[in-house]
Image (tube, rainbow, N blue to C red):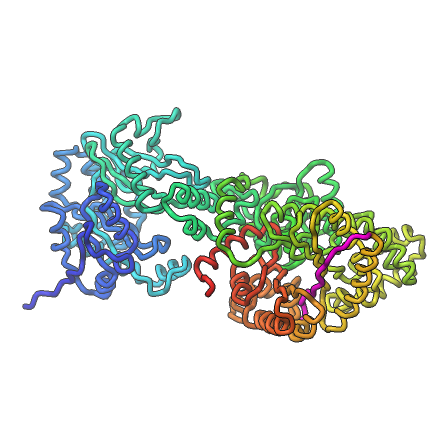
Amino acid sequence: MQKPEFLTDFTVISPSAQIDPARHGWRAKCLQRLVRLELPVPETVALPASTVRAIAAGQMVDCAGILGHFGDVPLVSVRPSPENPDWGGPATILNVGFNTARHDHLARTHGQAAADALYLRFVQGYAIHVARLDPDTFEGLEPNATGLREALRSFQQEMDEPFPEDPARQLADVLRSMSRAWEGTTARLLRQAKGAPSEAALGLVVQKMAQGIGQGISGSGVIQFADPITGDPKVKGRYLGQSQGRDALTKGDAIYLTRDPRGASLEELAPEVFAELIRHGAACRGRLREEMQIEFTIEDGRLSVLDAVKVQRSARAGLKIAVALAKDGIITQSEAVLRVEPRALSELLHPQVDPRGPRDVFARGIAASPGAATGRIVFSSQAAQASASRGEPCILVRRETAPEDIRGMHSAVAVLTERGGMTSHAAVIGRGLGLPCIVGASDIRLDAKDRRLVTRDGRVFNEGDIITIDGTTGEALVGAAEMLPPAQDGAFRQLLAWADEVRDIGIRANADTPADAQTARDFSAEGIGLCRTEHMFFDEDRLVVMREMIFADTSTDRAAALARLLPMQRADFGQLFEIMRGLPVCIRLFDPPLHEFLPHSREGLRELAEALDRPLSEVTRRAEALAEFNPMLGMRGVRLGIVLPEIYDMQARAIFEATVETVRAGDPVVPEIMIPLVSARREVELVKTRIDALAAAVRTKSGVSFDYRLGVMVETPRAALRAGEIAQHASFLSFGTNDLTQMTYGLSRDDAGRFMNTYVQEGVFPEDPFHILDVDGVGELLLIGAERGRKTREKLTLSICGEHGGNPESIAFCRNAGFDYVSCSPYRVPQARLAAAHLALTEPKG
């Protein structure tokens, strides 16, 4: 009879062995590095992915040959070694090779209790993870002779054969089980969810057991040298005497590593071993160029290092560790920049819910603006303002927000809406203000009349109840959650300074108020790329004047009303110029339809009639006349500037007069004036003629010379297609991708959230186009507009100023298209700076 052929492709890990992460996995390569550092790593054999796949397919490996590397009485562990540690893998099996003879020998050398406990542990692991028997039968047994007998009896009863005694048979079964578990459907789905390719391979490592059981100081533990939440240097971990594996992390009687007033420590119990661990940690950090967590075992006072893995860390810890490694010369500054994901920065700019605390989630929605805040529920802007005046933090809960909610949003610490998407009003303003915001929380139902919200599971929350909004995860939590403060410390600033040294595209901020501008300046934005002036008109005193202007009957009366707004606007722009200190400020002229400034309720119209001293019927009739079937496509933007030119005249005069004051103060400024919603060259010509005339008049009256730049906000497909004509009268084109996406798709950005998830899941769109720039459709319009615009005007400045401006994918597109800068919400500026640096480092131009 011909003997079966055994697989012999396995490698003893040594400093010079051919260990390849792609073949043998990350753990095998890491163990080789530890061996090269001369750490006390037990003998280890690595099985490549090809061998593991063959085992799963039914071939046999030379287990006797593998065990021959571990002496006459082998005792080993088997651990998974995928290419990427984040992909997981089957459970580690300890004490392979344990049998009756080994049990009897250990009872004589280490005592009956230790021998029983170790044998039982192996039987349990083998039965559950290898033989796939019911865990309930084997868990919960006492680690003594009785428990061991019960486990062996149950195994024989379930398998119709005694527990295997042959170490080679045991190892073969373990390798086969782990190999097949990796190839199973469930395992494939799990690792694909973690980003692994469907055909990701698995290596396995077989390592000599370091017992952790002995007469002298014996046990196991883990140690790391950085705090996983803060990233600060700190020795953390646990040690448990007479134990194996990672028991120290799960058993309540584990002791501390460093001296601690709360209890015993390894540093006191075994100072020489502790000092050795500190040296090994420093060696790993310096040579592996990473903060590592070391798994170790002590047997009769002798230290063994079983494994080392990258310390799991929060975003703030990851940034601090990267900067510290670069400052210590272990990695380069560029590598530190690349080690921090741009999107991770959002967690550092705002308070965050502490991941270590409990979470009672009552609603989920779209995470529209990151950060977290706790406050009392309010259901109206008036209630939010009242709460703020009392010094009580509040969370504004609305079906959806509108421009008249601006003051309420300013007063709230967070916003929750039942409807909306990533570019809805609440989302855009929330990001601009740095407010944690969740939109599209369709699980809740608002009852505005009774001032309460009801969740899907029937829980009721009334006005005044305390909740927490986690805008980073999109979850609303019951009560006050435990918080972590923002982390804009020296490491944060240092990393972004390194990023700025390498990036090659400008980053500006969308800022509507002096507070926004100061935030943008604090985050080192290179100017303001979009100032939406309409948000300046919703303060109470200005709103009254705006309404008077709307109800004026003649051009003269409109101009008279707007003259009262002129000094207010001049002061607004003067503050912006002062804060930005010579950096460019791009001011978009008035954009929204006028009906947004009118009350929507009959009671509000009655109050307006009293304020204007006009009949209610006249006010109602005028309000109805201003209403539009589709206001986003109605009389707004440049159309208002042409039909009611007094509005743009006032704003232009305010800009120029603020420029004169700034120049007189000794600060250079060249304001940029942007015309919104342009579709035709003639629109630009008409507005430019009036603005040029106003500039000349202000220069003559003041005696101060100044320059300004006039540009166009490209928000309509036609403007992109006719960019060549429009560029004849514009020194810059800034693509407003929010509206451009809306008009290109024929989608309402406020309502698309109702079905967008389904569309993405069904593959209609690869991503929400209001969240990630559609490079195929909208992107092609950007490219057409850029090409035609620069064909007319070679030095035409190009940018985007929609919410896409802060997305790394959009920045990559704009950089490749030759845009000069992107502009985004102030709190997204750090992310954009880092994303631009990543692109410059990984995809250098030329």
Could you tell me residue 91's position as x and y percent? 30, 51
Residue 505: tell me if it is visible: yes
Could you tell me residue 118's position as x and y percent? 21, 40
Rendered-image quadrant of the N terminus: bottom left
Q: Is residue 410 left or right of residue 308?
A: right
Q: Quadrant of residue 25?
A: bottom left
**Residue nearest the observer in this picture, 275 or 75:** 275
Q: Is residue 288 left or right of residue 702?
A: left
Could you tell me residue 698's position as x and y percent? 82, 56
**Residue nearest the observer in this picture, 716 or 371:** 716
Residue 845 magenta-highlighted: no
Q: Residue at x 33, y 33 (%)?
A: 254
Residue furthest to the top in view is: 261
The magenta stretch is 703-717
Q: Residue at x 25, y 38 (%)?
A: 297
Residue 441: tell me if it is visible: no
